[in-house]
Image: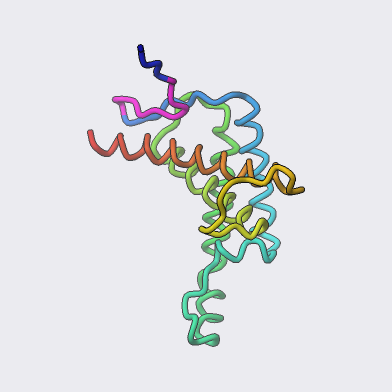
Amino acid sequence: MPRFRRKLPIRARSDGRFDVDLPEEVRSTIADLAAGLEQLVIQDVPETRRLFPTAYPDDPEKDAGYQVFARDQLVEQRSETAEILRRTVNNDILTADELSAWMGAVNDTRLVLGTRLDVSEDDGDIDFDDPDADAHILYHQLGVLLHHMVEAFSSSLDD
């Protein structure tokens, strides 16, 4: 039986850039998610706690100092990656820096969504009767997209 090969959504090119073959609805969704993520990060809501992990779990005073020092830099970095994704979301070719920003924004979005859904490593199949089933599906789809980005980026490093 012949094997059919599906075109990967993100592929490394020989010139160090990346081809992007995503449907318009996927592009629109990730742009909207990046914009929402940026707002959540700026607002400092509980769902973003995985984006700002505790540096000193045994020393709350030291950790508070670290958070004051590092938080603004992390917020700025996350805002920049979200802005790069939104600016380049319709591009069919990305630079390595742009793809890296996409990976960061998609990963951060998954972390926030996973926190909201209380996702753990033990979670298995999606319960389609769950009122949050669509959010769980989105979480998994973002994981697949992130996987393709990482694979493309990794394959470019082999060359």
- Estimate the x, y position of residue 31 in percent, counting from the top left: 63, 38
Q: Residue furthest right?
A: 131
Q: Residue furthest top?
A: 2
Q: In this view, does 1 lie above or below 22?
A: above
Q: Is 85 inside the magenta-drawn segment?
A: no
Q: Is residue 98 above or below residue 91?
A: below
Q: Residue furthest front?
A: 1
Q: Is residue 46 above or below residue 79?
A: below
Q: Nearer the viewer, residue 1 or 49?
A: 1
| Quarter holding residue 2 | top left
Quadrant occupied by the N terminus = top left
Quadrant occupied by the C terminus = top left
What is the basis of the colouring in this image? Answer: rainbow
Identify which residue is drawn at 36% across, 38% down.
153
Determine whether, in the image, residue 7 is placed left or right of residue 22. left
Q: Nearer the viewer, residue 155 or 99?
A: 155
- The main secondary structure of the magenta stretch is loop
Determine whether, in the image, residue 136 is placed left or right of residue 76. right
Q: Write the start and end of the magenta stretch as one range.
A: 6-15
Identify which residue is drawn at 69% across, 48% down.
36
Identify which residue is drawn at 54% across, 87% down.
61
Determine whether, in the image, residue 29 is placed left or right of residue 102. right
- Estimate the x, y position of residue 68 in percent, counting from the top left: 56, 75
Q: Nearer the viewer, residue 28 or 38?
A: 28
- Estimate the x, y position of residue 70 in percent, counting from the top left: 51, 69
Count the marks: 0
Identify which residue is drawn at 67% across, 58% down.
116
Q: Is residue 107 above or below residue 46?
A: above
- Estimate the x, y position of residue 49 in percent, counting from the top left: 60, 66
| Quarter holding residue 123 | bottom right
